[in-house]
Image: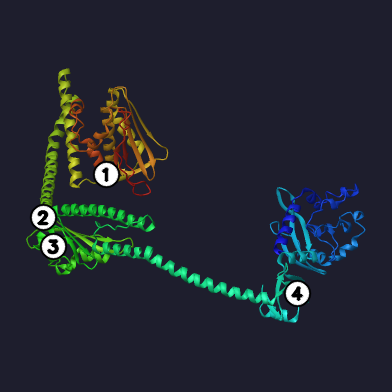
Amino acid sequence: MIDLQILQLEKINSDLSSRDDVRNLMLNQGLQNLSSGTPLGDIFSISGCDFIFLVNHSGYIVYSEISDPEPSTSASTLNVSTVTVSTVNASTVNASTVNASYLPIVRQRINDGSLLCKETETSLNGLFLLKNGPAIISSQPVFAAPDNNESSGTIILGKYLDSSFIESVQESTGSTFALYSFNNASSDLLQAFFENPGPNFTYTVTGEHVICYSVLEDLSGSPAIVIQTDADSSIYAEGQKALRYIVFFLLFAGLTIGASCKFLLDREVVSRIVAIDNFVEKVRLNENFSERFPMDGDDELSRLSEGINQTLDRLKTTSNEFKAQEHEKKLILDSLSELVVFMDSDLKIIWLNKAALDYMGMKMDDVIGQHYQDLYILYKENPGKSPVLKALESGNEEFGEVVTQDGKVWTITAIPIKNEDSRITGILKTGFDITVHRRSEEKLIQAKLEAEEANNSKSEFLTNVSHELRTPLNSIIGFSDILLDKVFGDLNEKQFRYISNISTSGKHLLALINDILDLSKVEAGKMELHYSEFSIDSVFEEVKAVLSPLIQVKSLEVTFNVESDVTTLEADRGRLIQILYNLVSNAIKFTPNGGKVSVYCKESGNRALISVIDTGIGISAEDQVKLFQPFTQLDASTAKQYCGTGLGLALVKKIVNLHQGDIWVESDPGKAVTLPFHFLSGNRWSSGKPARLESKM
């Protein structure tokens, strides 16, 4: 009942703290009401409390009302005739401030802050011991605004637990009831309390009465109030006797109900669960997924049995599919000519395919479970080199080759099988007969050696023939040039034309022979480069002067450009001129009249990048791979229209490679007339750094 009084007071305080007039008064916005004569008591004329304090956030009492605390006075409503008003304006204070002396302990607790709500989400509710008796108190924070959680102060409500409260309790319970301070309790009660502190009851039997005590704590958790009640001892004794009967009855009823429940559980639940468990164990041992467990009823266990049967159906289907897959895999492995052996981590054989069994001349039952080291399939002569043992030690895939006594060559592969923890759980060994393949390789190697020997003989023959042909050609060219120079007299037009044809054809034939001789030297590794430092401008000028007649005949626009950063190169000057002559003459040959040919040199890292670009017929991407092969032209029509042997670009590429450079072709598929050649002649700069080479087609 005291707790109920506390809850009611807390509800009153919660409603009061949310009112706007209380909030305005707390913020000192309601002082004008005093001057106009409106009594503040009308604001707090609330039934159910005996004193009110409004304290702002600074701890100053803004407003207070206190009723007469005499026990004879009814505390059901607030007696406003004994109001004390405290505000910031001292002129508004009521003359009856003497009544505030009734509650000095409340003011003391307000001053030390123990009754104030310093945090906006906390409130204080409970018992409080005053000078004239106990009371209940409720403290609630007052917010500055409805939507603002900032506290502007505290509102404190109190209610006396006086004689009227005691009378109402006695009427409700029919027992004698008294409240007094814990400090005024008897020594026996205090001793019993301190021996067993906490919320306890002390029973004292005195003649025909039984006296009961209960100690309640205040807001600070200290014992404050003692509740005393008494009853007739005979009534108490009858109650104790009835309580014992009730306990015995409940105990007997509990045992009876428990035994009945156990019987029902054993019959309806436990026995059925045991049957399900035995069935599952039987299926697990026999691995027979075709069995079913029947169970009548429409409860959880019957639905569980139905679920078990459905699971068995799925397991049976899955098992049949798995067996079919295993059978299919074994058929595939047995159809292989390759030897397949699977063993566990202890090298005990688990399975072999038909090829392995046929090779060993044994049956599956005779091999399963045997140790691999007792058999050493394909490694009987030297078991220490077996890839199986190496794979078991290293944990990696191992390979090996072995020649058996029948002369066959086998390649062996050992693959470790690992689980999720990277631990080896088995080894898969395969053996493949590569005898035919190895013999084919030997034949190919022998054919390659013979081809290389024939190629060397060819190169040596070409070198010798080219050298022998150059001597008479030089005589033919020399004498024809003497006749063209009219050393021995004038020539008529026909004679001049014939001798010019002889000289031109001889020089062309000599150029072809020189290309063949140079190509033979490169292939034989006898061509030597003679490095020197020279200006790239001088090389460009010399090439331009040699090819100027061809340029003029076709009316071509030919430009030679050198970036300012490139000055001196270190290379074989004669070979570089030969390279540029071949590339530029090729560009002139395949560019129609009035076209353009551009030659430029620029720095690219630590290399020189020399490019030849023309507006000729272009080269398709699939034909670019043939471009630098000797004695190769793109097609027959090109060979007929543009004469040549196909040696020029092949020789250029080999000379470039001797310079530790590379040559490649770039062509835009959307521009078939573009044919740029890039020669990386950045073999060495004057600093002596070797060029880093790249190849791009």
Q: Which quadrant is home to the N terminus?
A: bottom right
Task: Count up the numbered dots.
Answer: 4
Q: What's the distance in space between the residues labelled 2 and 3, CA to CA? A: 27 Å
Q: Nearer the viewer, mark 3 or mark 1?
A: 3
Report the residue marked by disc 2: 435
| Disc 4 element | helix
Report the residue marked by disc 3: 364
Report the residue marked by disc 1: 657
Q: Earlier in the sequence, mark 4 or mark 1?
A: 4
Q: Earlier in the sequence, mark 1 or mark 2?
A: 2
Q: What's the distance in space between the residues labelled 2 and 4, CA to CA? A: 111 Å
Q: Nearer the viewer, mark 2 or mark 4?
A: 4
Q: What's the distance in space between the residues labelled 4 and 1, CA to CA? A: 113 Å
Q: Nearer the viewer, mark 1 or mark 2?
A: 2
| Disc 3 element | helix
Image coordinates of residue 535 in percent, x first then y, are 36, 39
The residue located at (37%, 58%) in the rendering is 301
| Disc 1 element | helix
Q: Nearer the viewer, mark 4 or mark 1?
A: 4
Q: What amino acid is found at the position of numbered circle 4 in the picture?
A: Phe
Q: Residues within 10 Å of mark 2 (few under 14, many from 20)?
A: some
Q: Earlier in the sequence, mark 2 or mark 4?
A: 4
